Image: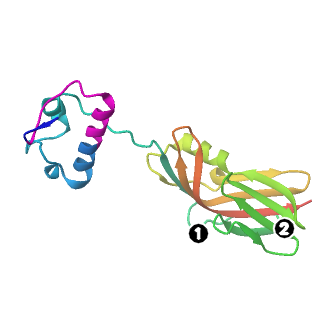
Amino acid sequence: MLKNGKIEKNPNVNKDDQRTISSIVFYFESRQGIDKLKYVPKDFNTSKMNEVFGFNYEMPYLPKEQYFYFRIPQNSLIDIKGYDYFIQLNSYSQEVQNSKEFSFKYYNSTAQIAILKNNKEIYRKSIKDIIQTNCKKYGTERPDKELSINELSIIDENENIKVRIILNNVSGRIDENDNVNIDGCEFLIMLNAK
């Protein structure tokens, strides 16, 4: 499309090349400054793509991930009545043994918390559901959102354990297929062994 140092309009450029050229224009417009783009008129912008290149500007494909950061209010008073044990964990220390009896694991790939008693798993739960519920309820327009303790709590039990998991804070992304990807999380876990 360049002849003698000037752009020659060509509406027949294939779609892939149109997207590539649009992507280059987007890069200069958003990062470098459109004035650093060679061969275009001084007053050039994306609205003049057809006039200069012979085809319309196409917004380049950008990943459609949405970000979230949920947290309970700072200095929250938490009722621990009805539970015998309390521990604070985070997703970075993936395995914690706080006593000879109990240990805790966090699995990043599945966003699951496991509780073990005497090295035998007695409980496992994913925290993804609670995140998806709050993302649907509040959206991700403002990714930093303070929620109530109840909104960030999981209360559950099985034949071995009664547990309450509070997500003190959790951050991550939801991709275009609504998959939750957690970047980091701090948990407050209260439990009673049966």
Query: Which quadrant, please, contains the C terminus?
Result: bottom right
Q: Quadrant of residue 56?
A: top left
As drawn, the residue found furthest toward the bottom would be: 99
Q: Position of residue 165 (x, y in %)?
A: 72, 58
Residue 7 in the magenta stretch? The answer is yes
The mark tally for this picture is: 2
Left or right side of 72 for 82: right
* 46 to 34, vertically: above or below: above
Q: Is residue 23 left or right of residue 42?
A: right
Image quarter of the N terminus: top left
Q: Amino acid at mark 1?
A: Asn
Residue 141 as seen in the image, left or right of residue 181: left
State the image coordinates of residue 38 (x, y, percent, origin top left). 14, 48
Query: Which residue is at 20% across, 25% downward?
Result: 11
Q: Quadrant of residue 94?
A: bottom right
Residue 118, placed above or below residue 162: below
State the residue in front, 35 or 107.
35
Q: Residue at x 88, y 71 (%)?
A: 101
Q: Which residues are magenta?
A: 5-23
The residue tagged with tag 2: helix, strand or loop? loop
Q: Tell me the residue that label 2 is attached to.
A: 84
Q: In what element is the residue under mark 1? A: loop
Foreground residue, 157 or 32?
32
What is the three-letter code of the residue carrying label 2?
Asp
Q: Residues within 10 Å of mark 2 (few under 14, many from 20)?
A: few
**Mark 1 lies on residue:** 75
